[in-house]
Structure formats: structure tokens, C-alpha cells
Amino acid sequence: MKPLSAATGHPALTRLHQSLWITVLMSLLFVGLFVYYVQAEKAIDQANEERLESLGLASELRQSSDDLTRMVRTYVATGDLVYQKYYMEILAIRDGHSPRPLDYRNVYWDLILGDGPRPRAAGAAVPLLTLMEQAHFTQAEFAKLAEAKANSDALTGTELAAMVLIEASGGDVAARRLRAIAMLHDAAYHEAKARIMRPIAEFQEMVELRTTQAVREAAHFAVLVRWVFAGVGLLLGFTLWQTYRALRHTLGGKLEDIHRQIERLGRGDFDEPIPVEPALQHSVLGWLAETQRQLLAADTEHRRSAAQINNLAFFDQLTGLPNRVLLLDRLRQTQAISQRTGQYAALLFIDLDHFKTLNDTKGHDMGDLLLQQVADRLRQGVHPDDTVARIGGDEFVMVLGGLGETARDAASATEAIAERLLRSLTRAYTLRGFVHHSSASLGATLFLGQGTSMDELMKQADLAMYRAKDAGRQAVRFFDPAMEAVVKHRAEIEDDLRRALQQQQFVLHFQPQVNSASELLSAEVLVRWQHPERGLVPPGDFIGLAEDSGLIVPLGRWVLQAACEQLACWAGRPGLGQLSLAVNMSAKQFRDPGFVAMVLEVVQHTGADPRRLKLELTESLLVHDVDEIIATMQTLQGHGIGFSLDDFGTGYSSLTYLKRLPLNQLKIDQSFVRDMLDDAHDAAIAKTIVTLAQSLDLPVIAEGVETLAQQRFLQQIGCHAYQGYLFSRPVPLDVFEPLALAGTLQSVA
């Protein structure tokens, strides 16, 4: 929508322009008429003032004549010279020989008694006749006044003569006074007085007629102007109303409303739409409403872009959790809060167990689904104020605050949360119809305030997590300073382990497997590390590291090849050629895509009889991808290779899966054998395993047999194959071969 200023042909704007011009012209006409009306009213006043002034001058002439008569008569009658003085003052003022006093038009001389205050001068002396000439009288009017003035001046001659008679010396004073009084009261004096008053009266009639007519004409004209002025005022009001309507139609609303809406736009407040009537869509308010909509769209887009940028910068795109950058910021805030409140906080490092196996066997899309569900469970497992972040791969980090004022309380609270999280993470996941089981290892470290750097806290939690993995996974461990030394030692061992593979520092030991008559049936091969400096290293010190580092795959190949070479070496030898060897296979090794090809290639290359080779699988392998495991086993079994299920009863295997597995043997785990004579539950489990094996027509062997009593109990429940210290520890080849050649192993218990 274009601004109205740009819409040159807009009807509303054109009408507003026309209304404004008409209003301006009417306003100018109204002002002109108002001035004219004021002047007409002033003309009335001026006419009245001229009338009053004219009558005032005539009145002054008459008054001065009357005052002169009173003064001279009083002087003649009393002889008081003050009246002579007053007479001469009046005459001097009227003739312009003395300044005119203030308020002269009042009945002034009647107020002067004795030696009272004198009138105050008002300016230059001006003759009364001159004032009459300046009063704009008509010629006839002025002639009447001039006649009256001349008659008054003639009368003053009689009055002066009377005063001279009084002032004369000698003779009879009383007689002179009587004669002077008679001069001022005889018929001639009164006739002279009348000659003054008659032209004044005629003048007043003439002025009254003229000025009254002028006032009447001025008043009539003023009324006419008043009506015209009122009419123009009504027209101006109408044009103002029209202009208001045009302005409102152009603006679309009140100025205060438009001002308020502009202020809202200036503040960036776009939430409440600007209301506009349908007929005013093209007004200024309509333009503001359209501008608001456009700004709102732009603001929405800006917010969306800002949110997207913020999301990319601070959040993991797969799970929606905070990433490492935001995690560190939240950790910094938690440290500051802990410093201020004195409350302990914790950092948790969570790593999924065997996540790579899921990616390798089911694909990364399935792994992504698992990570998303794990993220949801972690979010639901903590307080909304706590932070859950994903920092890469299958690694998650949590920051927990407000755990207590003592390390003991904080550790207890953290352990409770961690255990709850671990239980949540072990519940089955549904990944596109596929049921998947998983677990996690969790490391935790506590902190109070900002005494420990964030990098150090991350390192501590990471170390604790690896300690949890070393403890068998699906566990929680707290950081201990000694763990750093363990990790360093672990790194050294890993380096040595890689070197050992290159330099062939491994040897095989053999542990006999016998029947109830102690006759040698087969042996389990166990790898030992012949370290050049530390001597013989037991498997517990390096097998777990080999699993975590991925070295278990090349190490497992070496063990398999060494076992097959030994089988090939024994082939055809009396007392040895009939022996079978059991080789342990790790889950990581078994899931390696090239596992089948590797086994068959080793068997073929060494010339070993595959029927004499038995691969031992742990029950934990069956947690994932059982169908693929079964297919792999069937392929190898088709080449004569047998399988034994190790550690049976310790994992999560389903009896349905167990029935489908192409097994050749079940192995009772030593954890049940160890305490079965004292623990009814272990004894019951051992009996159940034997019964299950018999129902599946599978041979069963018990490991960890260390006493004759254990052997007898196993024999009583139907287990007739054994492996353990009761018969022999794992021994090197040079010790094992004589035992094998003897055929029967005596109990060493």
C-alpha cells in the first residue's frame, strides 16, 4: 500500500485539498468582514463622539458666556476682585491666551469658591473658535457658532465697561455701582445675551439633525455588515465541517489515535492490530494498519531468523537440546548461583553403552531415533531449571543445581537422580517398530561456587563416566582425584597394547574342561600379555581397555588364529588330536561386518578342523539384533564351527531367542556356581539352567568349579562337564600338553 502523500490522484486527498482551500478562502473573507464589521461599529461610535464633541463645544461657548455673566455681576455687586480675576481667566482661556484646564467641560466655575484650589493646566492654549474650526463642522454650523462667539465677544465689552465703572475713582461710589448693575440687568444686556443663545440653539438643532442621521446610517450599515458577517460565519462553519470530514476520511481517525498508533509502531508493538473501518482502508490510519501488517510480517521473519540463528548457534539440531556452547554458559551461571547461595551443584556426563553397535547394524537413522528418545527421557528426568545438553555422538551432559549445602546431601541427591535416569534409559525403545534395549554409563562430579574451572569439571565428569564403564556399564560413579592417575595409567596401557599387537607380545593359556570322570574333553583358550617390563599381564587388566579402544578386533583375530594354528598342530597327534578349543568372542568383534569372512579365512589359512573349534558368546550379545546374530551363527555352523553360550543367566536373553539359537553348549556362569551351596537362589538358577539345557537337548558345562562339593552338587542336578580351579588353572602350552596327554586330571582341591 502506497503512502497517501504518494497517491497524487487519491480521491480522499483531492477532496481534502479542495476543502482546505475553500476553508482558507472563507477564513480570509470572514476575517475581512470581521474587520469591516468592527469598523462599522466604530463608525457609529465616531458619529456619536462627533455629535457629543459638537454639542460640547456649543455647550462650552454657552457655559463660558454664562460664567462670564455670573463673574461680572458678582464682581459689580460685591466689589470682590477675585471675581474680576475669575472673569479674566475665563476670557483668557476662551480666547486662547491661557492653557485650558482639565475637566473644563464640567460645571467648573461654579465650584470655585473663595481661595479654593485652582484648575490644573492641560496643555497649550487654544482659542475656542479654533477648536470649533477643527471639529469638522459644516460651514453653516460653524457660521452659527462664529456668530454666537462674536455676539459673546460684543457682550464682554458691556461687561468690561461695567467693571471699569466700578474701578473709577472719585464721585459717588454707590451711584456708580448702581449704574453698573443696571448695565448688566437692563433689556439691552438681556437682548445681547439672547443674541448669543439663539445661534447656539440653531447650531445644536443643525448638529443634532446631521449627527443623528450619521449615527442612524452608521447603525444601519453596521446591521447589514453584521448579517453578512453572520452568514459568512455560517458558511465558514460549514466549510470547516466539510474540511473536518475530509480530514477524518483522509486520516481515518482521531489525531490522538493516529499519534498513539505511530508511537506503538515506533516501540515495535505489533501484537494488537490497528482497527480501521472498511470505508477508511485508504486513509492514513489504513496505511498505518497496512504498515503494521508489513512490519509484523518482517518482524516475524526477523524473529524466525534470529531464533533459527540462535538455534543453530546454541542448540543441537537432532535432539533440540543445548549444545556445548550453551552448556558452558549455563554451567557458568550455575557456578555463579552456587557461589552466591552456598548450594552445591553437580555436572553429569552420560554415555550410551554399545551405541556404535546400533549404528553399525541398523544404520545411523535408527541411532538418531534412539538419541532423540534418550534426550526426551533425560529432559523429563530432571527439574526444568536444570540443563540437559548433547555435546556430540551419544554423549550427554547435565548441570544440576540447588543440591544442598553439604557435600553429603548433594552426593545423595545426585545419586538418586542418576539412578532414576539410568532406570529410565534402560526401558525398551521402539524404533520404527523395532524394540531396542540400551543402557548408559554415568559419571558425576560435585562443585561449590567457581573454584573449579569449567574445563576441569568436564574432565572430572568424563573420567567418572569411564570409571562407570569399567565397572561393567549401566552404573554411576563419582569423580575421585585418584581417577586421573588411573586414566593416565590407562592411556599408557593402551599405547603399550597397540605396541604389543605389533610386536606379538601375547601368548595363549589353556584351561581344561573335563567330564564327571575328570577326563579331558576340551579346553578354553585365554589370552595373556607377556609384557617386556611388567611381566605376565592378566586379561582383566587389558581386555576392557581393548574393548573400549576397538583393539579387541585385531586382538581377537590374533587369539583365533593362534588357537586354530594350535588345533592344526595337534591334528593327528595321539591324545591331542581329538581335543576341541573354545575361543571367547566379544560382542564388538562378533558384530564386525567382516567377522564371518575373517573366521573362515583364519580356519582355511591355518588348516584347522572347524569341528574342533567352538566360539563362546556372552549372553549380553543377544540384547541387540538377535536375527542377524542367528544368521551369522548359522553361516559359521554350516562350516562345522560350534557355539557355546557363556555367562548364561546373567543377561537379558529371551527363552524364545534361546530356542532359536544354533547353540552346541550352555555354560553356567561362575557367579552362580560360587555360592550355590550357600544361596538357595543360585542353586535354583543352576538347576533351572540344567533343566532348560536338557529340554533343548543341549550339553551344559559349569565354570568356576573350585571344590568337590560343588562338583558333586552339579553332578546331582545333571551337569556333567566342568571347568575350574578344582581341575586346573589356565596354564601355558608346555604345561597343558602333558595334562592332555595324561587324559585324566586329578583334583587339585
Image: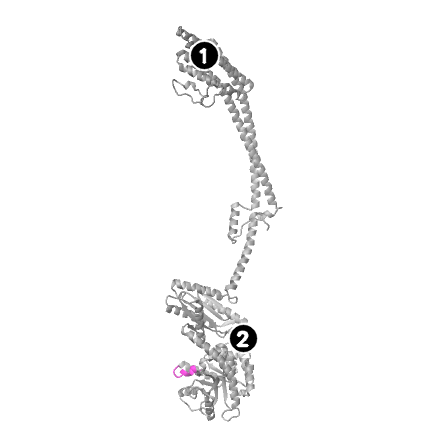
Res. 545 in view: no
Q: Which residue is mark 2?
A: 360
Q: Quadrant of the C terminus?
A: bottom left
Q: Nearer the viewer, residue 70 or 640?
A: 70
Q: Residues within 10 Å of mark 2 (few under 14, many from 20)?
A: some
Q: Residue 499: percent from the left, percent from the top?
A: 49, 80
* Number of numbered discs on residues: 2
Give the residue displayed 54% in from the left and 18% down from the top: 142
Give the label, 2 or 1, closer to the camera.
Answer: 1
Please, what is the three-letter code of the amino acid marked with disc 2?
Answer: Asp
Which residue has dot 1 on it? Answer: 160
Where does the image place residue 512, in percent across and percent down from the top left? Answer: 46, 88
Q: What's under tag 1, amino acid-wise?
A: Leu
Query: Is 687 drawn above or below residue 237 in the view shown?
Result: below
Task: State the residue in front, 688 or 181.
Answer: 181
Q: Going 55% across and 79% down the picture, which residue do you hit?
A: 594
Question: Residue 347, labelled with which disc?
Answer: none
* Secondary structure type for disc 1: helix
Q: Is residue 676 magenta?
A: yes
Q: Residue furthest right?
A: 9
Q: Is residue 567 left or right of residue 678?
A: right
Part of the protein shown in magenta = 669-679
**Which type of secondary structure does the marked residue at label 2 adopt?**
helix
| Alpha carbon distance from label 2 to label 1 | 153 Å
* Rendered view: 310 above or below 177: below
Residue furthest front in the image: 169
Q: Residue 336 colored magenta?
A: no
Percent position of residue 391, x then y: 49, 68
